[in-house]
Image (cartoon, grey):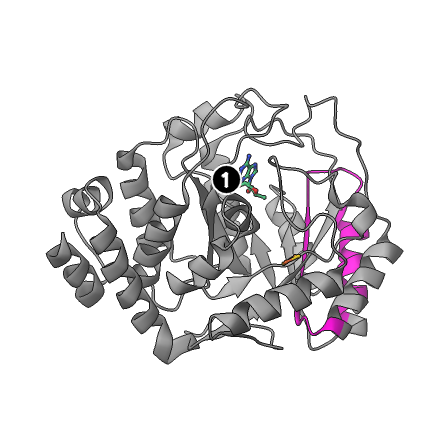
Amino acid sequence: MNELVEKLAADHTLNDDEYFDLIEHRTPEAAELLAEHAVAARQPIYGTTVFTRGLIEISNICKNDCIYCGIRRSNRNVKRYRLEPDTIVACAREGHELGFRTIVLQGGEDAYYTDDVLGSVVSRIKDCCPDTAVTLSMGERSRESYQRLYDAGADRYLLRHETADPDHYAMLHPAEMSWEHRMQCLRDLRSIGYQVGAGFMVGSPFQTTEHLVKEMRFVEYFKPDMCGIGPFIPHHDTPFAHEPAGTLELTLYLLSIIRLIHPHVLLPATTALGTIDPRGREKGMLAGANVVMPNLSPVGVRKQYELYDNKICTGEESAQCRGCLGLRMTLIGYDLAVDRGDVRL
Ligand code: 5AD
Ligand code: FES
């Protein structure tokens, strides 16, 4: 096991059988060694600087019906909301005052946000905060739409691929969604010029070690600028309500492997990781992560953007969240940057 860790640290790649063994037969000692190498690989590039992104959850209205997601359209128990453009811009300004230099607009696939509406929000944020990167996380759109939003000033786009295996994708999504289309969107985003974030859930229903080997391969060849991975957490109003959550241990292990595959990748310690363990985000940093994404949404709507149960930070004001995370990072010897936090290639 230790030889595989050393090999990955030296070569940044393994063959399929080796990835399989590394994941399937992992031990606490291998995890510790991987984390050590991951932190060492991150050190010359990002050090102990933690990049922050202020996340504004602009709408929980979604036309999709992803089986794992709490805001899927079939869930009649969600109180739906969408933020007005003025509210979004005000949140972004507040985020800028708090020290965020990346604003992420995330939402369900809500038809209200046409290219005109969303593009105008993006350009208003760029006008008022020109030193700030705008990231969109608004799901699958056409190439023309992605192009228009890019032209309006968007810098980055997050679209998790959710799983690198098309058959597994079909077990997590309704028939009208396809893995091929997801991949097409990712390729379109990249060719337009966006910095692109992909990602997947750890421990999602039906996930096998073979699937995880494919995830590692995907990270190798697609080379996302950012890779968002967090544990699957069941939501009580979805068909997966009684499925087990992904584990802290496996998530940390995969974070370390991904850091070693691509030492330059932006790797968030996700809110889901902070939800399954009270020190999950700190542990994420110590396993090789370098990004956190605290919530900037108005407190009044936070509980309604419930993708999974028991999501953290739904009662805190934006300033409290940033302060809390800053303190948490200081306590482990890391510090939050006031910086756009672009990928360093
Ligand atoms: N558990 C963990 N993550 C989830 N997401 C959606 N539902 C869940 C869940 N139940 C993730 C998906 C999506 C991102 C916005 O949130 O990966 O891409
Ligand atoms: Fe939001 Fe701690 S990070 S309250």
Q: Position of residue 337 (x, y in %)?
A: 58, 76
Q: Of 294 and 334, which appears nearest the observer?
A: 334
- Residue 187 makes an appearance in the image: no
Secondary structure beneath dot 1 equals helix
Q: Amino acid at mark 1?
A: Arg
Q: Position of residue 284 (x, y in %)?
A: 44, 58
Q: Of 90 and 334, which appears nearest the observer?
A: 334
Residue hosting label 1: 182
**Left or right of 209 in this view: 135:** right
Q: Is residue 133 above or below residue 314?
A: below
Q: Which residues are drawn in magenta?
A: 98-126
Q: Is residue 122 magenta?
A: yes
Q: Going 21% across and 55% down the picture, which residue do you hit?
A: 29
State ligand 2's quadrant: bottom right
Q: Is residue 332 magenta?
A: no
Q: Position of residue 338 (x, y in %)?
A: 62, 77
| Residue projecting furthest to the bottom | 44
- Residue 209 makes an appearance in the image: yes
Q: Is residue 142 above or below residue 193?
A: above
